Amino acid sequence: MKSIYSNTISSQNHSYLNYNGKTVRRSSALPESTADTFGFAKTGADSAHYVGHRSYGDILDAVIDPFVDALEKDISTYPATHDGWDKLMASDAYSTRGYLATQKVPLDSQNPNLDQLTIDWLETMDKSTGWYDRSFAETVLEQMCFAKNNKDAKWWCVDGGSSKIAEAMASLLETRPTLNTQVTKIEANSTLGVDPPGMTVTVAGGGQFDFSHVVSTLPLPVLRTLDIDNVGLTVKQTNALRQLQYGPAEKIGVLFSSQWWNDNKVISKIDNQPINIQGGQSFTDRCIRTVVYPSYGPNGSSSSNALIASYGWTADATRFAGLFGNDDASKARLKDLVLRDLAAVHGVDQKVLEAAFVDIYPWEWSQSPFAQGAYAFFGPGQFSELYRCLTKPIAKGSFHIAGEAISPRHAWVVGALDSAWRAVYSIVLRDYPELKDKFKDLWGQNMEWTASPTFQKVYTHEDLLAVHLAIHAPDVYKL
C-alpha cells in the first residue's frame, strides 16, 4: 500500500471564490474578506458595522479559538484536565447559529451579538447552507481539525483509494471476512450456556453465526434497520440510535479528456490569466458549492483528469441530490447545470468544458441503503445528552457500537479508529484483563479515554474507559 502527498489545501491559492456573481482568486481575497467583498453588505450583513469591517475568518476565530485552545490544553498537559471539554459541553445546547446570536463575540470592547443576516454571511462563506443549525460543538470540533497548531500538517491520500487500508488490514487476519453477506438480525443469546451471554447473528437467507462478542461499525441509521430488539439496548440507547443526527453530503465526479483547469492555454475571463490550478479547492454559492482539484497534480504518480466538480453538505446536498436521476434526461440536466456552474466559477466559456467532457457520476450518501447519511453530525445537546450512552456496556459487554459516530471526531478515519480502540479494549478488559498492558503497548492510548497524555504511564484511576465500564456494569467489569 502506497501513500501520496496530497496538496489538498493549496499554498498557491490560485483557485477561486465566487459569491453573489463576483469571482476573485483566493490569493486576492485572502486573508481579508469582509461583508463588502462579495456584496453581502447589500443583504444587511454587518449593516451597523459593529464588527468593524472585519473578515468572516477573524470573527469566527474570535468565537471558536478559545474553545479550541482549551481542548488542546486538555490533551497536552500533565496532569491532564477536562476543563476544555467541560467548557464546550456547557455550550452544547446551542446550535452554531444560536450561539452566535445570543453570546457576545469577543472582538473588541463592544462585544456585539451578531444579527441573523450577519450570521447568514458567515455561514455562506464558512460552511454549507444549514450547517449553523447543527450543534455548536460540531463546529468547534471541525475547526480543531484545521486549527492553527495543525496548519503545517501534511495531508496524504492512499494510492488506489481508501479501500486499500481495509484490504491491507484484512490480509493480516487468520480468519478472512465474509463479504457480500447482509446481516438482518443481531441478538443476545443466553442459551449458548455462557454468562455474559453470547451473540447470535442472522444473515439474509437465514444462516446464523454465534460469537462471544459483536462489534457493529454500521452507521447508526443502518443499525436501526436490523432486527436488534433482543440485543439488550436500554430505552435511552434505542432513542439515541433514532435521534443522533447524520449529515447529508454529495459529490459529483466529472471525467474530462484533459486537465483544463491546469492548462496554460485555457485563459480565465476573470483576470485574463491561465487558470493554472494545482490542488486545492474553489468555493461558491452556486449549486456546486465546492470544487476539489486533483491534489497530486500533473506531475504526480497518478495524474487524473477527474474533477470533484461538486462537494456539498447539509441542505445544499439534499437539494442537489434531487437532480441525481439515472435516466438520460436527468443526467443531461445535471451535466448542463454542473458545467454551467464550473464555467461561471472559472471564467471560461461553457463550450470549452463541453468539448472536454467525458462522463459524470453523482453520489449522495443519504440515498444509499448502506449509509443513510454521510457521517454523524449531531444536533444541539446531543453530545452531552445522547452520545455517551452508546459507549456504555450492552448485553453485559458482549455487543459494542463503534464507528466514527461514537467518537468526538466525526467524519474522519481517526474517529473510526478511536472508536475501534474503545471497542476492542472493552473486550480485553472483560475477557482478557491480563493483556491490557500488552494491548496498550501495541496500540497506544486513546486521548478520549485516558486522564493522561499518550506519552505518560496510565494508572488504574486514570484509565477512564475501565472506570466508565466498571461503573455501568460492575458485575462484569472489575477495576
Image: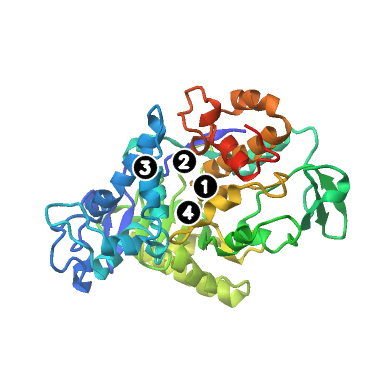
Where on the picture, by quarter, is residue 479? top right
Q: Under tag 4, what secondary structure?
A: helix
Which numbered dot is residue 207?
Answer: none
Q: Under tag 3, what secondary structure?
A: helix
- Alpha carbon distance from label 4 to label 3: 14 Å
At label 3, the amino acid type is: Gly
Residue bearing the label numbered 1: 304
Residue at image coords 60%, 29%? 443
Image side of residue 301 versus residue 37, left or right: right
Q: Nearer the viewer, mark 2 or mark 4?
A: 4
Which numbered dot is residue 84?
Answer: 3
Counting residues from the start of the chain, the first of labels 2 and 4 encountered is 2
Residue bearing the label numbered 2: 296
Q: Nearer the viewer, mark 1 or mark 4?
A: 4
At label 1, the amino acid type is: Ser
- Check if mark 2's residue and mark 1's residue have beta carbons within 8 Å: yes
Residue at image coords 23%, 64%? 114
Q: Under tag 2, what secondary structure?
A: loop
Image side of residue 217 versus residue 297, left or right: right
User: From this viewpoint, is residue 150 visible?
Assistant: no
Q: Under tag 1, what secondary structure?
A: loop
- Alpha carbon distance from label 1 to label 4: 40 Å
Asked if 404 appears above or below 422 in the picture, the reply is below
Counting residues from the start of the chain, the first of labels 1 and 4 encountered is 1
Counting residues from the start of the chain, the first of labels 2 and 3 encountered is 3
Quarter occupied by the N terminus: top right
Residue bearing the label numbered 4: 383
Q: How crowded is mark 4: few (under 14 residues within 10 Å), some or many (20 or more)?
A: many
- Alpha carbon distance from label 2 to label 4: 37 Å
- Alpha carbon distance from label 2 to label 3: 37 Å
Counting residues from the start of the chain, the first of labels 4 and 3 encountered is 3
